[in-house]
Image (cartoon, helix red, strand yellow):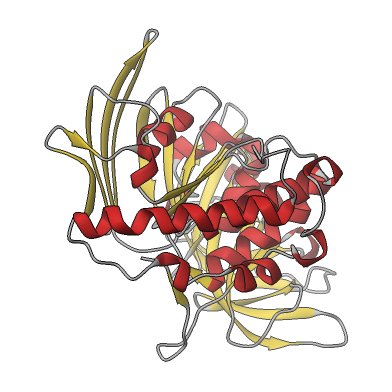
Amino acid sequence: MFSIRARKHRDGFVLDVAIQVGAPGVVALFGRSGCGKTTLANIIAGLLPADEVHIEIDGVPLDANGKSLRAEHRRIGYVFQDARLFPHLDVMGNLRYGEKRAKRFVPHLHDLRMNPPPAASRITLDMVAPLLGLEPLLSRRVNQLSGGERQRVALGRALLSGPRLLLLDEPLASLDAARREEVLPYLEKLRDELAIPMIYVSHQFEEVLRLATHVVLMDRGKVLSQGTLDDLSLHPELRAIVGSDAVGAVLHGTVTAVDGGTGLATVRIGDNSLRINLRDAKVGAAVRVQLLARDIILATSRPENLSVRNLMTGTVSRVVADDADTDLVYVDIGGAHVLSRVTRAASIALDLRVGLPIWVLVKSVSIRGHAFFEAPPSASRTPLS
């Protein structure tokens, strides 16, 4: 779906990346501030020329053989850190501007013999307003909106422009924690209810955990690694960026039961099950779960009479030194791996080694779980290709 190769020298900084993503979803560009994420985003959007560049999205070349589409012809909806709304227009006026842009795309694309149906006929204001909770805001002026509301309007305007790609450059960076929590569910709805590819730039791992289906780790203008979050969650490169407190495994599971009385959902992961607090969970839903290494307790015999209700079985697959005093222990739980940080003294005392059968304990309250919508083959989602 994405093929991106870009090289750019700029003020002593060199961006040199190659990214290949074959499935639709949310591609997160993740790394520390200054690693080149925004530079790459601006190159993709056509706002910054590159020294060398080749970009294709769904087989459509944006930059190839020395020829580049201008930014206004790329059909990329760009949402910046600040909403950049037109202050002289109300919310409705800002959204209508997005619709006008969509109409401009079509003749240019026909000239290129791409012949897509008009984007404006496939996504409308009547769809966007309820999706992003904009209906009560339509008559408001920009200066009457909160930061979170402004970003939702910016998302709506970008969607109404009929993009083939939605590009979000740290759209929550200027918001406080409460406003971020306000906007994140809307971003999840965009991912789950619209079949529109997204590139999401962030240095906040919590945002990546909740949104991304594919992650590109960047550092100093280079791609360190790329793949699913499940795979990358165990990579040393990610641990170096997120810090020791955020080190852990990201696992995919399926909800098999929901207890209406306690609000706990039973999630099948590998050969084991976990009971976790999961808002509005439904049986059959796909769930992404993060288990932090600091919250995982290991036992070499089955523990009894504990308040911890989550107990999984597995086998030690790897033990590596984390620092001078601690080890990271990888445990295969049957089709998935979890990670535990233990003191070196405990590692020696328990004789933790590859192949050792092990019990894994984790508190329900320490598990972060996020549900993903997975449509059955016959289900209809709104295509925006």
Residue 261 in the image: state x and y as whole percent. Answer: 88, 87
Quarter of the image where the N terminus is located = bottom left
Q: Quadrant of residue 102?
A: bottom left
Residue 138 seen in the current view: yes
The front one of 348 and 77 is 77
Residue 334 vertical position relative to residue 4 in the rendered view, above or below = below
Q: Residue furthest top?
A: 12
Nearest to the observer: residue 315 or residue 207: 207
Q: How many marks?
A: 0
**In front of the other: 344 or 321:** 321
Answer whether residue 1 is visible to the viewer in this image: no
In which quarter of the view is residue 221 placed?
top left
Q: Residue furthest bottom?
A: 378
Picture coordinates of residue 201 (x, y %)? 52, 41
Residue at (72% x, 80% y) in the render:
265
- In the displayed structure, would residue 367 be above or below residue 143? below
- x then y, percent, for residue 161: 49, 55
Name the residue at 51% across, 22% down: 34
Give me the residue at 44% from left, 43% from top. 235
Q: In this view of the protein, which residue sits in the foreground, 24 or 301?
A: 24
Q: Position of residue 20 (x, y in %)?
A: 27, 49
Question: Is 244 situated left or right of 44 in this image?
Answer: right
Report the residue at 28% width, 25% height from top: 50
Image quadrant of residue 383?
bottom left
Quadrant containing the C terminus in the rendered view: bottom left
